[in-house]
Amino acid sequence: MFFDTHAHLDDEQFDASRADIIQRAWDAGVTAIVTVGTTADSSEINARLAQSFPSLFAAVGIQPNYAGQAAPDDWDRIVALAEAPRVVALGETGLDRYWNFAPFDVQQDFFDRHLRLAQTRDLPVVIHMRDCAQDVLQMLREARQRGPLRGVMHSFTGDADTARQCVEIGLYVSFAGMVTFKKSHALRDVARTIPGDRIVIETDSPYLAPEPKRGRQPNEPAWLVHTAARLAEVCGMDLASFADLTSANAATLFRLPG
């Protein structure tokens, strides 16, 4: 079986076919999916979805590119949602210097809020990082000095040294469809360096469709098997063993029954 650690099943592209997409994932062997919030509104939707489908769990948070649009009470809504049934993580949070849709100090403020709440509630954080590895690592180190920290680097595209530092801090590293792209040789080299007990997989659906589904939108959790197959090859494992490994890692990360 496979565990999709990051999807956005609240996306409007799924409105007409959400139940069918979740069933197709199950039929493909994807028996657990974490559907991830990006705003307070989407976090509420994902929390409800997780209570409606037995294969779903939810992460709640405010993604850095939406931090500048957050209403005054949105953070309080996230804090409340952290206690909701089947909410297993906080996020998507982190930092982004590529799009720069929100002032960087606002992004840092919200990232810090997620990290502190995660440590208080003993929840993992789902971390977005784009063109700002050192900024993210600095805040993670500061958080780690305060106490234990659990989390996952979502859709990782950084270099091996950044991945190593993330693992040393105590995080898992997740790979999405980009690791299957024909030109992603460097990213596959990074994947080979991840300790076996720290690698997980995701679709980031409806985005980042893997080969051979690339260019077909929307991406969906059933297509996780293509990413898993490519990574299994990269890591020198058979697909069933790699599926078992990454699912067990995800269950440990989110503290779910094995």
Image: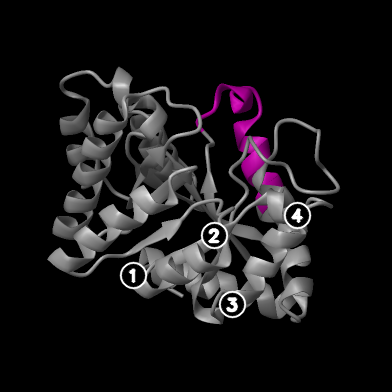
Residue ID for mark 2: 174
For marks 3 and 1, the one nearer the N-term is: 1
- Residue 143 image-quadrant placement: bottom left
Per the image, label 1 sits on a secondary structure element best described as helix
Decide: marks 1, 2 in contact (CB < 8 A)?
Answer: no
* Mark found first going from the N terminus, 2 or 3: 2
Q: Is residue 180 above or below residue 72?
A: below
Tell me the distance, in whole angstroms, between the alpha carbons under discs 2 and 3: 13 Å
Is there any visible trace of residue 122 in the rendered image? no
Q: Is residue 97 visible?
A: yes
| Neighbourhood count class around disc 1 (C-alpha, 10 Å): few under 14, some 14–19, many 20 upward | some
Q: Which numbered disc, 3 or 4, marks the residue that appears first in the sequence?
A: 4
Which is in the foreground here, disc 1 or disc 2?
Answer: 1
Give the mark toward the camera: 2 or 3.
Answer: 2
Residue situated in front as seen by the camera: 26 or 177: 177
Q: Position of residue 66 (x, y in %)?
A: 37, 25
* Identity, as a three-letter code, of the amino acid under mark 2: Ser
Please give the label number shown on residue 169: 1
Helix, strand or loop status at disc 4:
loop
Q: Nearer the viewer, residue 45 or 168?
A: 168
Identify residue for label 4: 184
Q: Nearer the N terminus, badge 2 or badge 4?
A: 2
Q: Is residue 17 a member of the stretch shown in magenta? A: yes
Instruction: Report the magenta residues as a range.
Output: 10-25
- Is residue 240 a member of the stretch shown in magenta? no
Side of 39 relative to 199 (left or right)? left
Disc number for residue 71: none
* Badge 1 amino acid: Ile
- Quarter of the image with the N terminus in it: bottom right
Residue labelled with disc 3: 245
Label 1 with label 4: CB-CB less than 8 Å: no
